[in-house]
Image: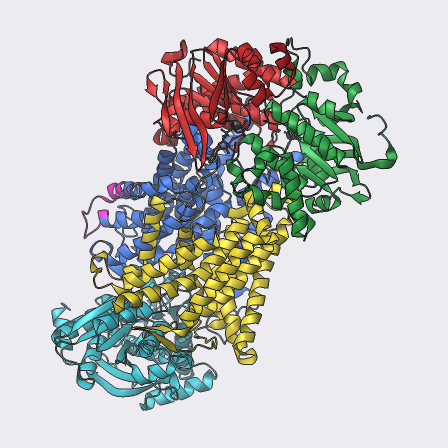
Chain colours: A blue, B red, C cyan, D green, E yellow
Amino acid sequence: MSEPTARTRALHWGRRVLPLLLLCVLPFYLDAFWLRIGLFSLAAAIGAVGLGLLTGTAGQLSLGHAFFLAVGAYGYVWLAGEPGPGLPPVLALVLAVLLAGAAGGLFSPVAGRVRGIYLGVATLALVFLGHHVLLTADSVTGGFNGRSVPPLPGFTDSDPQLVLLGVPFGAAERLWYLGLALFALTWFTACGLLRGRPGRALTALRDSETAASVMGVHVARYRSTAFVVSSMYAGLAGVLLALAFRRVVPDYFALALSVDYLAMIVIGGLGSVAGATAGAVFVTALPLLMTRYADQLPLVAAPGAADGVVGPTEAARYLYGAAIVLVLLYTPDGLRGLTRRLRTRRRLERPPATATSSREPTPAVRPKEHTP
Amino acid sequence: MSTSAPRPQATEPPELRVQEVTVRFAGLTALDDVSFTVSPGSVHALIGPNGAGKSTCFNVLSGLCRPASGTVRLGDAELTRLAPHRIAALGVARTFQNIVTTEGTVADNLMLGRHVHSRAGFAASALRLPRAVREQREHLAKAREIAELTGLERHFDTPVALLSYGDRKRVEFARALCLEPSVLLLDEPVAGMNAAERARTAETVRDVRAELGLSVVLVEHDMGLVMRLADEVTVLDFGRRIAHGTPDEVRGDPEVLRAYLGTETPQEDVA
Amino acid sequence: STKAGDQSTGDGADGVKTGPGVTDSTLRLGALTDLTGPYATLGKSIVQAQKMWADETNAKDGICGRKVEIVVKDHGYDVQKAVAAYADIAADVVALPQVIGSPVVAALLDDIERDQLLTFPQAWAASLLGKDSVQVLGTTYDVDMIAAVDFLTRTKKLGKGDTIGHVYFEGDYGTNALEGSRWAAGRAGMKVVDQKIKATDTDLSAQVSALRKAGVKAVLISAGPAQTASLTGVAASRGLRVPIVSSAPGFAPQLMKTPAAAALEGMLHVVSAAPAVSSDLPAVRSMVAAYQKKYPGSPVDSGVLSGYNAAQLLGADLKKACEGGSLAREDVVKAHRAQKNADTGLGSPQDFSDVARPASLATYVLRPDPKAVGGLVGVEDAHRAPGVEEYLKSSGS
Amino acid sequence: MPASPPDEERAALHVEDLDVAYGRALSALRSVSLTVPHGGVVTLLGANGAGKTTLLRAVSGTLRLHRGAITGGRIRYGDTALDGRDPVAAVRAGVVQVPEGRRVFAGLTVDENLRSGGLGLGRRSPALVREGRERVFTLFPRLAERPHQAAGLLSGGEQQMLAIGRALMAAPRLLLLDEPSLGLAPRMVARIAEVVREINAQGTAVLLVEQNAGMALSLADHAYVLEVGEIRLSGPADELARTDAVRRLYLGEETGTDHPSDAGQGVA
Amino acid sequence: MTGLLDNLLSGLALGSVYALVALGFVVIFKASGVLNFAHGSLLLLGGYLIAVLHDDLGFAGALALAVVVTAAVAGALDRFLLQRGEPDPHAAHVQTIVTIGLDIVLVTDLSRRIGGDLLSLGDPWGDSVHDLGPVTVADSRLAAIVVSAVVIGAVFALFRYTAWGLSLRAAAEDLEAASLMGVRLVRVRTLAWCLAGALAALAAVFLVAFPAPGLERTTGQIALKAFPAAILGGMTSPGGALAGSVLIGLTEAFVVGYQTELHVLGEGFGDVAPYAVMVLVLLVRPTGLFGARGAARV
Ligand SMILES: Nc1ncnc2c1ncn2[C@@H]1O[C@H](COP(=O)(O)OP(=O)(O)OP(=O)(O)O)[C@@H](O)[C@H]1O
Ligand SMILES: Nc1ncnc2c1ncn2[C@@H]1O[C@H](COP(=O)(O)OP(=O)(O)OP(=O)(O)O)[C@@H](O)[C@H]1O
Ligand SMILES: [Mg+2]
Ligand SMILES: [Mg+2]
């Protein structure tokens, strides 16, 4: 607990600014394929951070994230589009996020009362009911074929040509920066939440509802607010995804997507913003990259070749599934646990830490706290 | 103490009155028509054999359990209908007999105790408004102060799960203090501590009571501690109040000796 | 170094204008297919059939003096993967003779329109009409269902006042089919009782109960093979022995190996834009023979036929564009739209000139036959059901 | 170093030069040696965080559940080496621990909790189980009153009885008791003390970790004092009870009390 | 009236099939706190094995072998991929995600093998039916009702009266205390997974038998329907799983059966109705019909 020296402070800032800088120059080097994957990852990261807040911090499982992504995406499309009020896209973006929050709020009678795995499966209902509505209410949602997404002004290929350092800046490049900005906003706010009063209250009610409530935490309200906030992040992610896809279709927002998000936060490491981000990139980018490059693997046949051999997509699926298993086998705390472990190993080579200051992961067993 | 909003009761905590409280669980009356009053600023001990209903009484006081009949009043407020968090906001803090801490460090737990004294909501914290940042810093200082008071400063940044039983017990105590309560409910605060540590905790209780002028309701099986600290004692057995009075009165009560203390020696004193 | 962003458009050595996907020696086509998801069987048949077509074409000096190459991308019915795969290949192909998966097609519609990339989706919903670059081949589901109702009234003595059931998948396919059946039934004075189901529903007992309660005289089904099998099997076992007519995707040769085979043979008919694979049209027979020779062991199903047909139609478009002096994408689309009577001999001729109309209105009626190649034999040849024109007018296309 | 262990021959539990660490670097015990003779009662005193529970965990084999490990030394029970073994091995060898803080199975009934006590011993005849249960019920009549109540709903003291009863169901030859008097009313403390004596009289050795030093020292033949992971004092219990340090720290005798019952909490 | 009976019976039959699947979820959740996303693929594995073996071994032989192999696979997955090192209750969420990875691998492989086929399991019931008064039920469904009643009863007894059941429940309450009692945590838990695997193989038979057309690559997805069933029952007891499943089955049968009357809810509501019912129940009873109410006292 020593005062930060100039050196550590510089290190601290360096660790934040450098990655950001790096992300900023990427569009100068990557082509549309990579930028698209990057954009998907950024959007997923925003959603994952929201889910991390709910599941990792407040201990509330949600399999309904796909639904809130859909609310955000469709909300934006409808608000900014035709049919719909045709609002200015930027306003529509903000309203869509609020709409997702409101949708989360509507679910709060359940979200405030139902806990853990029960909530997880209850939210499953949202995905199925939501899908049902997306298909049925076709005057708003466009039905099965969905709707095309009105672009944000200034974020299309047809906007005034922009060439920076010899690189033409099209929609992909511009959207990348939008995604980056929204992601930075997410990071900033989520860290604030986690380290602030709400984060502590949520952690407390995750670990012991009783302890939290007798210390003055309004359990049901905090639970449902966490749900609302997480829905809003999901909504934002949904808008960004819609902009990246240029078209929203109901089938994308299915259960598999919710499960993916769950995988993201666990693979990244529960309870931290950086973890959720790492997990989001892993889960989003890996299958896409593997699918693209799998045909270069040995023993993999070209798509559509004879029976009984492994095609590239299958190979990619095998590898992806195995990657999930392996990552979690060897770093049960997720990708973030991995970096932390590397760091402590480095620290351990220096003089041993004293008993009180070391921050080892919590022990495996903790007495279950039912009482008295 | 400049940080928290000034509490009106800071000088004179309201009186806590338990009136004819009855609690039933399926087929079992855990509290049977129990009444007692905790006068402002006093230490009121609640003793009795195991299963007498002491913890249940605490659960009623802190809103975790709703009595079948009877009322609990704190000053003018009636607590029996309030949710636990509302009761906490009125200045009632408690510890648990079986430790109920949350994961995270001691600091995190103590900051939870500051919850009712801080305001920052989701929006303010997310946007890191200056007010939220300042508030957080001030409360952290306060929590550290209380950690020092309870001998936890060494463990301030240690995850609670790594502490020994006695230290975790202390964390609970400190967390309750962080609430700056007007009424402090302590359920066996020194269980699992050795004599020296018990004395130290007793000292702390005495200090904070003097300093903050709060009322304490104490459940404890360590009769020495009870005798030393308590101004008044209520004895429960099978959910019923069997004795009431000053420590000395209670200690001599044959009913108490039979049901609770079970020693022959004091009985001779009485004789 | 930073990336370079150039899109090559220019003139080839032979004076033909070229665009993305075309070089002096090759013509590159793309296929976004499903080889690992729910439509894997279909995907595989189409891929193989189109590869066969490409090989045959290249053996005959290719198109416009260029070798044809098909880039196959498998998305496994995952929209996100499909979108990424599209981004990956779009800049490098001249047309897409195959895109499988309605949600995939839906998600790509805007991009395809923007890139003017001539696309033949393997989906037959009317909602895909009206897009310049997207061509639904043959009839749409609604047109088929009108033919189905017509078939029932003509041959099964259904008429005014009767009730028919329609079991359909949620989504584009089912909805579109239901539109057709509703319209046709209304025209014939009949009532439709509909039952919407999901792809994961494989036990249709409850649906059959409901249909029986409604007293249906016939049942239409627009779902997958598993659902058709369950519906027919359950209906038969419960004594609901009524004619059942399925949309083309609702049948697969594998069904003839299930416990429901007998019931299927006795009760089912299939309406389709394409003839049965076992048909004796000469072009079909030679194609089937070639396919069986090239891929022994692979089942010959309707996917083979439609895939090969699509490839041939695209080949014709490309040749025409070449004759017009340009293989640039927009000119390929133009050439395509200029075809008013494209006939490959593999089915009914098609008219691509009106983007808003189905390319063909003639429907075949088939029935299961375990002994036939592809499990189906023809019952009625391609014909236009009465009222189809009227329907197209009334539905505003 | 501890004084030479009493009666080497009959000694049953030997802990020799034990080092234990939690996580990677957190050393909790250093070079601890201790002996519990067959049929004896040994008590282990120490402040909060001294490592008493850690020592018991090392013996019963549950250290690994806490990400702890034995980094040096040996533990033997009779001829069985217990270091590095799992809890099952300890139970099979006859060493059973009553965990700190009761830890009864809250959702199981009292009866089921008792049945669970014998799980480690493999298949046993119902008669044997019934006999064990009778024995527990005579020791703790309060439990006999409600065999079908969920254990989580018992009061703290009742749970403590159940925890001890559960351990007794495994017919231990060495019982490791971690603060059995925790949260018990004075009368119950006396009762537990009696029970410990009874158990001991029936031939079970006891290693008793206690904060209630008065009771512990009156029960034990031999005592050890643990401080910050190391044995500081050891010796016959009555001798140790007379040393200044123990009197001050563990018996609380110089805290200016005027009631004789303060320290002993009414041990009869 | 006939319609009512009809729906009642088909709901019951459907429910008992779901119950076999839901029971697997419950057993695994109880034993390890893991929400087993790979359950669908275990089911698919069991079904696939029966499908490829029944020609050689006959149905009974194939079923027996499939049950054993699926149980072994489930146990092995748990033993070698989920529980590594020490038992760790905090790892449940991580292990849940591992099951997602396992599911991906298993499903990919099995789908690759099954391809577009619709496999028959060679079960003895074929498409035969029974007339029970005015209504007709498939024999396979009658068998399902009987088998799941028996199996659930057996599992219930296993939980209640055997040492293994007691060990399992004790470990579910408190790992450390259970291990102090000498419970072999790893083995107890692995056995639970084996049991769940066996149940999955058994469930596969009834899921793909007659009213359904046969085993396809997507058969495993039906396991999803058992989620609400398990949750409705409270996720802790075999009896709860049965009750929840029957409720789900009935809901589905009735909503589909009366779809025309329920048009206002939109077409195809039968598929989402179980979820709606589940949410409503959870609103009233947040831990399901028979779930442990947050009975922990303080
Ligand atoms: N939620 C509950 N359901 C059923 N019975 C309960 C419940 N809570 C408490 N009891 C019963 O009520 C009685 C009183 O319990 P309580 O915990 O208040 O005792 P106590 O006085 O605190 O005892 P101890 O000193 O042992 O902690 C006990 O017999 C207990 O079993
Ligand atoms: N799971 C754990 N991980 C890391 N450190 C631990 C763990 N458990 C205990 N410790 C540390 O080991 C030391 C000894 O703890 P132990 O629980 O053995 O103390 P104790 O003597 O039993 O204390 P008490 O009387 O309070 O129960 C303490 O410093 C404690 O913080
Ligand atoms: Mg109590
Ligand atoms: Mg201890």
Q: Is residue D7 above or below residue E119?
A: above
Residue C52 in the magenta stretch? The answer is no
Question: Horizontal and vertical percent for residue E204?
Answer: 47, 67
User: Which residue is pictured at 36% across the width and 12% down the height?
Assistant: B8
> Where residue A296 sits in the image (x, y, percent)?
53, 64
Q: Quadrant of residue D158?
A: top right
Residue at 13% in and 72% down: C186
Horizontal side, residue C206 vs residue C3: left or right: left
Q: In screen coordinates, is B81 left or right of A202? A: left
Q: Residue B200: x and y, percent?
A: 60, 15
Q: Is residue A148 above or below residue D245?
A: below
Above or below — where is C274 with respect to B127? below
Q: Quadrant of residue C117?
A: bottom left
Up the image or down, E211 lies above or below E81; here it is below
- In the rendered image, residue D168, in percent from the top left (x then y), is placed at 67, 40
Q: Nearer the viewer, residue A301 or D258?
A: D258
Image point 36% across, 24% down: which residue? B70
Which region is colored magenta? A79-95
